[in-house]
Amino acid sequence: MTLTDLGEKVYTKALTYLNEIEEEPTGFPMSIVDFVIEYAVNESHFPDSFTEDRIATRLDRCSNSLAMACVEVYGRAGSEGERAHSENSISRTYDGAWISTRLHDVLPNYVGII
């Protein structure tokens, strides 16, 4: 599996979810999926010895969570980088400025020797 394969799988899962909740995404961009996967790769701290195949295989185990992170980023259009947003007497508070910190709970985490 490559990161491109993983991206396509996550994209399909995110679109399926949005269609099932009748959100009808218009122009759901692949760049959101690329952003979430890059974030996951960086936050997982994979060793330099890991190949792309090995990284993609590890992240495939949390593909559902990656898809939900994509849905979250898509749903927050217009409030990127905010932890809180108020408009027309509606207030929203977010767990993280870009992607929910709950994603960290499912990502593999590799720590090198200090």
Image (tube, rainbow, N blue to C red):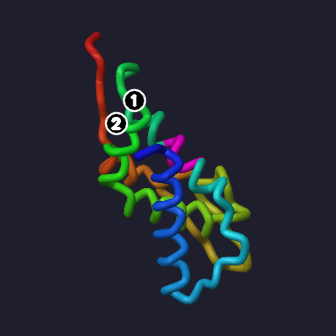
Q: CA distance from mark 1 to mark 2?
A: 5 Å
x and y percentages locating residue 25 in the rendered image: 65, 78
Residue located at (45% from left, 65% from top): 68
User: Could you tell whether 104 is left or right of 32 in the image?
Assistant: left
Residue located at (44% from left, 57% from top): 66
Q: Nearer the viewer, residue 86 or 112?
A: 112
Q: Is residue 37 magenta?
A: yes
Q: Residues within 10 Å of mark 1 (few under 14, many from 20)?
A: few
Can residue 112 be seen at all in this image of the molecule? yes
Tell me the amino acid under the disc marked 1: Thr
Toward the front, the furthest residue is 1
Majority secondary structure of magenta residues: helix
Q: Mark 2 highlights which residue? A: 54
Vertical relation: 87 (above or below) 66: below
Can residue 97 be seen at all in this image of the molecule? no
Toward the bottom, the furthest residue is 22
Quadrant housing the C terminus: top left
Q: Quadrant of residue 24?
A: bottom right
Q: Residues within 10 Å of mark 2 (few under 14, many from 20)?
A: some
Q: Mark 1 highlights which residue? A: 51
Q: Nearer the viewer, residue 85 or 19?
A: 19
Q: Are marks 1 and 2 in contact (CB under 8 Å)?
A: yes
Vertical relation: 46 (above or below) 113: below
User: Could you tell whether 64 is left or right of 80 in the image?
Assistant: left
Magenta residue span: 35-39
x and y percentages locating residue 1 in the rendered image: 40, 46
Tell me the amino acid under the disc marked 2: Arg
Kind of element beneath mark 2: helix
